[in-house]
Structures are given as C-alpha cells and as structure tokens.
Image: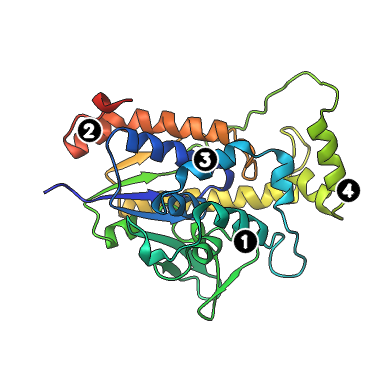
Amino acid sequence: MSERIGLALGSGAARGWAHIGVIETLVDHGIRPDVVAGSSIGALVGAAWCAGHLDSLSTWVRSLSRVDVLRMLDVSVGNGGFVEGRRLMGVFGDRIRTRQIEDLDPPFVAVATDIHSGREMWLRRGSLLDAVRASISLPGIFTPVQHENRWLVDGGLVNPVPVSVCRALEADVVIAVNLNGDILSRRRIRDKAPSAPPSAEDKANDSLLKRFSGLKQFLSQVGSRLGDPSPGLFDVTSGAINIMQDRITRSRMAGDPPETVIAPRLSHLGLMEFHRADEAISEGRKAALRALPALEQVLGRDLRSRQP
C-alpha cells in the first residue's frame, strides 16, 4: 500500500507563483499529492491544481504585466483593506470554473484566520472561490471576507505552511513548500538596468495611475528602492508580515516537521510583484529539483529517472 502524500503550500503573495513550478516538477517526476492544503497564495495555486486548471493559471500569470496587475486592483477605501479583490477573483474564477471544495479530487483545504478570535479556520466545504478569497486576504491590503458570521483574513497569519492540515487529512508523507525561507537572510537585490526611453507599457502605466487618486503614492511605496533613507508604509507592513510568517513557520514546523521542505530562493521578488511569474515559476522548479534526492529517500523510489 503506497503512502498517502500531502502537499502544504505556503503563503508569500507574489512569490507564490513558485508553487506552479514546484507542482509541475513533482507531477513530472511521478509525485501526485493525495491531499493539498494551502495558505494565502498557496490556497489559490493549490485550488487551481486540484480543480484541474493549473495550466490555465500558469498561462495567465505568465502573461501579466504591471498594467494588468494594476487593473485588477479594485481600490476600496474604509472597508478594512486597500483592495476589494472582486476583479482578481472574477478573473481567477474564469480560469478554474467555479466549483465546490468538496467536489475536488484530490481533497483540498484553504486556511484562513478569524480576525476577531485569532482562530485558524480550515475551509473544506462550500465555494472554492470564497475560500481562496478569504485565505489571500492579507491584512491592510485586501478587505476581509465574511464567512458564516466570521470575518476572515489571510491564513498565513496563523499557519503560513499548513503541514498540520495535511496531517489531519491523514497524510503519511508531507511535502512542505516554504516561500519565505530566505527572505530575512539576504538583502533584496534590484536589477540595475541602464535607463531607456519610456515604453508603451510605461506610458500606459502612467496613464492608468493618474486615474486612481492616491494609488500612485501607494505603489511607489510598494516598489520603494533599496537605499531609500527611510522605509515606506508598505515596506514596514510587508517587512513585519515577512518577520511574523518566518517566525511562525519555524515554530510550527519545529513542532510538526514535514518529511521534506522545498524552499525556492525568492528574496529578490517583492511581495506584490505578481508580474514576475516567469522568475518565480523557474525558482519553484529549481527548488523542487534540488529536493528530489530527499524525496527519493522518503518515498523509497527513483524519481529522477522520470524526468521528461
């Protein structure tokens, strides 16, 4: 009887596109998880794979430009977050074709956090889109989601890499994907390309920014450059989230260690740089390939011979 494999997909905002590369590589080498649990962006990618639409998601995210990302930011003021998230989930829903969680195969759980009690919530029934939307609700960025009389936010606040959920789903072997393992250990390095005349995309970007009052200032804080004399609001928020999730991840995985950790090297990617999917997916593939020897020992089978 083969061992039941669980895949725990961690939080990490735009760095989460690396999950696509990880899953593709695992499947290419004959590893198909029997259960999947995801926090935040891990829930979004995990939902797409369990619904059978990872290829469609991959094609879409690879096509995203800065302008495309901006167009999905339906700005909300006074609702507990900066972005409503309806446009994003509408586009995502078009690609996974809205389904109920309990209909998925393999079984899937999205992790969210009750903002009032701090309780960890496991969403395993009902609308897949609603569950993903709750799980990705990064505080201060996305508005909270009401679910069964609770207000839910990002699952990464309490369980950034949901190994424990896979255990509860009776996984014998848990493969954890930690997106934030190197975020605090290395300084971010920005590519320093020579200046060039503004492109058509740059002009469209400027035009779009002018249409949203206050958005330009926010995005300048999102993309603040290394060496600025003081951190912007978003730098402080994202830095605090990175520290919190790194510490919680270390603590939880020490208490309930997975059999294997896949850790893409993603410190060069910003929290909201969703337009850099190619880089993230590539790093996910590389990290999964590095983990193959450990997975061979855990699973007791030859995986590298399955390389396509």
In the foreground, 88 or 173? 88
Quarter-of-image position of residue 28: top left
Residue 275 in the image: state x and y as whole percent.
Answer: 64, 38
- Report the residue that reaches farthest toward the bottom: 149
**Nearer mark to the viewer, of 3 and 4:** 3
Asked if residue 58 is positioned above or below residue 44 in the image, the reply reads above
Which amino acid does the dot numbered 1 rest on? Pro
Q: Nearer the viewer, mark 3 or mark 2?
A: 3
Q: Are marks 4 and 2 in contact (CB under 8 Å)?
A: no
Counting from the top left corner in percent of width and height, residue 261 is at 35, 41
| Numbered disc 2: secondary structure | helix
> Mark 3 or 2 closer to N-term?
3
Badge 4 or badge 2: first in the primary sequence: 4
One can see residue 179 in this view: no
Give coordinates of residue 254: x percent, y percent.
33, 50
Mark 3 vs mark 2, CA separation in Å: 27 Å
Sequence-wise, the earlier of marks 1 and 3 is 3
Q: Which residue is mark 4?
A: 210
Residue 58, numbered circle: 3
Within 10 Å of the Cα at label 3, are there few (<14), some (14-19), or many (20+) other Cα atoms? Answer: some
Please report whichever mark, 3 or 4, sits nearer to the chain's N-terminal start.
3
Residue 296 disc label: 2
